[in-house]
Amino acid sequence: MLQFKQQCILLDMQATNKESALKELAQMAVENYHNLDSARLYSTLLEREQIGSTGVGNGVAIPHGKVAGLKDIIFCFGRSMQGVNFEAIDNRPVYLFALLLSPAEIASEYLQALAHISNVLKQHTNRLKLLQVHSPQEIVSLFTPPSKKP
């Protein structure tokens, strides 16, 4: 089950580089999901980045990882209006960050959530909307699968 709280949306990230962006996202997750350890989460995200950048191009990064002790999949969203050098595959700045964290034992649900988030962010019109929206509710709505909307 994917958890996505409106409080886990940051519309104006202050990060200026990859490390500070990961720290800012990790801190937001820790503040909203108290069973997380900030240092361990940051370390998990850095380890994943060493495998290859999660900056997927078109101004998007999807940092993700499996975290011991989680009960549900966690999704947080951040937006940087100035852009962050995130070593993305297209070498362009990243403006939209989708943080996905998963318990180690639910690989199938994790991959489904990652695919859903990727599909939303692949669409140019969705990326434009995410850069322009003013409320967390609009972001939650964009990422909520159609079958789950009220």
Image (cartoon, helix red, strand yellow):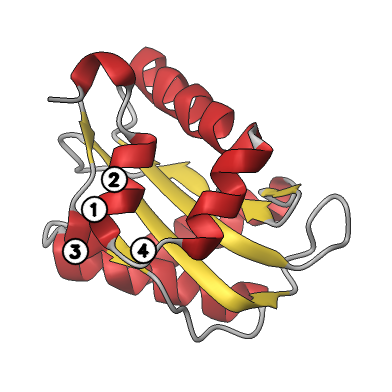
Residue displayed at 55% across by 83% down? 15
Between circles 4 and 3, the one closer to the viewer is 3
Between circles 1 and 4, the one closer to the viewer is 1
User: Do the residues under discs 2 and 3 have CB atoms within 8 angstroms?
Assistant: no
110 to 8, vertically: above or below: above
Which residue is the site of mark 3?
7
Of helix, strand and loop, which one carries label 3?
helix
Residue 78 drawn at (x, y percent):
44, 64
Q: Is residue 100 left or right of residue 106?
A: right
Between circles 2 and 3, the one closer to the viewer is 2
Residue 98 shows in this picture: yes
Residue 84 drawn at (x, y percent):
68, 75
Mark 2: few, some, or many residues within 10 Å (few <14, many ≥20)? Answer: some
85 to 123, vertically: above or below: below
User: Do the residues under discs 1 and 2 have CB atoms within 8 angstroms?
Assistant: yes
Q: Is residue 101 left or right of residue 79?
A: left
Which residue is the site of mark 1?
137
Mark 1 or 4, nearer chain start: 4
Of helix, strand and loop, which one carries label 4?
helix
User: Do the residues under discs 4 and 2 have CB atoms within 8 angstroms?
Assistant: no
